[in-house]
Amino acid sequence: MKSLRLVLAVLVLVVLVLASTRTTSSASSVPPQAPCNTEALGLAFTGDLQLSSFQNYGCEDDWAFAWATVGSGEQAIGVTEVLQYSPDAQKWSLVSRESDCKASILPADIYKLGCFSN
């Protein structure tokens, strides 16, 4: 009877260890999701591009588009920007529409909404 309890206890322990290892390894292999909100995207507007407001934005995978107003008063202008998320830095950055606006690089909606205005 004691040996049966010991075998069952060892078996339960092995199952718990395997379940714990499987959960840990799958959770650590999932890359962090890019935050898609005005706060996260707005941090990419630095230097001369002081963000005043967003008119529209959208994200897909690690890419985003933003229709925004930068500057204020008579200096305010509407801009369309394409952004890319860096999982390592955990932030969005503006990219060059000249070099990155290619259908082969961008998701279809980001390409359509981020590359054909302003």
Image (spheres, rainbow, N blue to C red):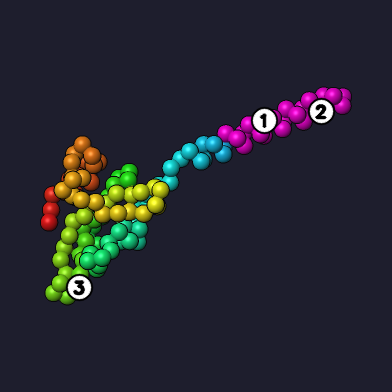
Element at label 3 = loop
Badge 1 is on which residue?
15
Q: Residue at x 23, y 64 (%)?
A: 49
The tag earlier along the polypeptide, 2 or 1, is 2
Q: Residues within 10 Å of mark 2 (few under 14, many from 20)?
A: few
Q: Residues within 10 Å of mark 3 (few under 14, many from 20)?
A: few
> Any magenta on residue 109?
no
Q: Is residue 90 above or below residue 68?
A: above
Q: Is residue 65 above or below residue 103?
A: below
Q: Which residues are magenta?
A: 1-22
Q: Which mark is residue 72?
A: 3
Distance from Cα at disc 2 to Cα at disc 1: 14 Å
> Where in the figure is residue 37, as x and y percent of width and height?
34, 57
Amino acid marked by disc 2: Leu
Q: Which mark is residue 6?
A: 2
Element at label 2 = helix
Amino acid marked by disc 1: Val
> Where in the figure is residue 97, as x and y percent of width and height?
18, 49
**Tag in front: 2 or 3:** 3
The tag earlier along the polypeptide, 3 or 1, is 1
User: Which quadrant holds the C terminus?
Assistant: bottom left
Tell me the chief SS of the magenta region: helix
Q: Residue at x 40, y 48 (%)?
A: 88
Distance from Cα at disc 3 to Cα at disc 1: 62 Å
Residue 53 in view, yes or no: no
Q: Residues within 10 Å of mark 1 (few under 14, many from 20)?
A: few
Amino acid marked by disc 3: Ser
Residue 13 in view, yes or no: yes
